Amino acid sequence: MNKYVKYIVTTLLRMVLLLIGVSIVCFMLITSSPIDPVEAYVGSESNISQEQKDVIAEYWGLNNPPVQRYVTWVKNLLHGDMGISIAYQKPVTQILAQRFQTSAVLMITAWILSGIIGFLIGIVAGSHAGSVLDRVLKTFCFILSSTPAFWIGLLLLAVCSVQLGWFPVGFAVPVGKAASEVTVLDRIHHLILPALTLSITGISNIALHTRQKLIDVLHSDYVLFAKARGESAFQIIKRHGLRNIAIPALTLQFASFSELFGGSVLAEQVFSYPGLGNAATTAGLKGDVPLLLGVALFSVLFVFAGNFMANLLYGVLNPQIRKGEGQ
């Protein structure tokens, strides 16, 4: 029990140090950006005077030295205040809470789809190694891994939405429909294409690694012994294969949290999906430092939580890991 407590405390300490490091690096990069927040705020074609621009800069604290601005932001953060978004004129915490609800549904759906589809493709390909089906599935995975997610999104949008009219062109809910009238089916209808686009980015890695791991398992000595006892291919995969290929697949699946969050930025832009990725893009184009820092910290927590859950699930899938930790 002490080892579990020590592991949790050490993990949380690493998370705090990581958040500090990410916040410093992100703040340095944002403040070094050539984008002028005031110009982005008022618009490049605005006719307001320089004195008015100075007043705006003073209001947002943009005239202060970068170190002072960072220290002020950290002090406010310790009190639960992440600042006010320049682009949206709302508290950053409120924007993150609103946008996360939309992005969470998109990312979790895409994450589950990529894991299930990739794992099943890997099992089918690995159990038929060297066959025509295996070569077709490998080629399919190679094509997916080398194709940009935004291009797939544009292709799906052009074919399924514009030409065939099966799905809406964008947004998370129907345009012009009152929030009280939006149904679950409406949300699912708008979710399908963005989720499918985002899930494609993680299918190939899971499938190819699962395939190779299953091939290694099927060529092991204990599988040869199982075949000699008369076990069928299905029984061998079920009894000996799944447990050995589940942990590598799980590791890759949770490690893909970072790619999932990054891919959501492109997917949300293509489909005008109002999530965190869309907010991050807007904040970057507007030089919105508080919102960009908020999204960066939130993404770190998101990825870190995924890796932490993966470590906890290893012991569930493989009892030998629990025994090793208990010794």
Image (cartoon, rainbow, N blue to C red):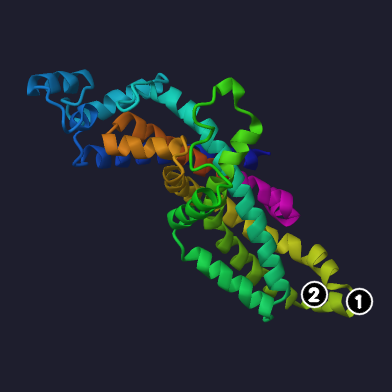
Residue at the location (28% across, 23% down)?
A: 72
- Which residue reaches farthest right? 230
Q: Which mark is residue 223?
A: 2
Q: Residue 21 location in percent, x, y?
A: 36, 41
- Quick check: 180 above or below 315? above
Local packing at callout 1 (Cα closer than 10 Å; few below 14, some 14-19, many 20+) is few
Tag 2 secondary structure? helix
- The x and y percentages for residue 98 are 49, 27
Q: Residue 203: image x %, image y %?
A: 58, 59
- Front residue of 15 and 41: 41
Q: Answer yes or no: is residue 15 visible.
A: no
Using the numbered discs, state the Cα–Cα distance from disc 1 to disc 2 in whole angstroms.
Answer: 11 Å
Task: Decide: is 72 above or below 275.
Answer: above
Main SS category, magenta section: helix
Depth check: 226 or 149 in front? Answer: 149
Q: Which residue is mark 1?
A: 230
Q: For the image shown, how many numbered marks are present on the structure?
A: 2
Look at 24% across and 27% down and name the residue there.
69
Residue 318, magenta (yes or no): yes
For label 1, the SS is loop
**Image position, residue 41 (x, y; %):** 23, 28
Instruction: Please tell me which residue is depicted at 55% across the width and 37% down the height of the picture.
Output: 104
Q: Assess whether residue 118 is covered by the magenta stretch.
A: no
- Quarter of the image for residue 219 reads bottom right
Quadrant location, the N terminus: top right
> In the image, what residue occupies the spot 81% across and 63% down?
238
Bounds of the magenta segment: 307-327
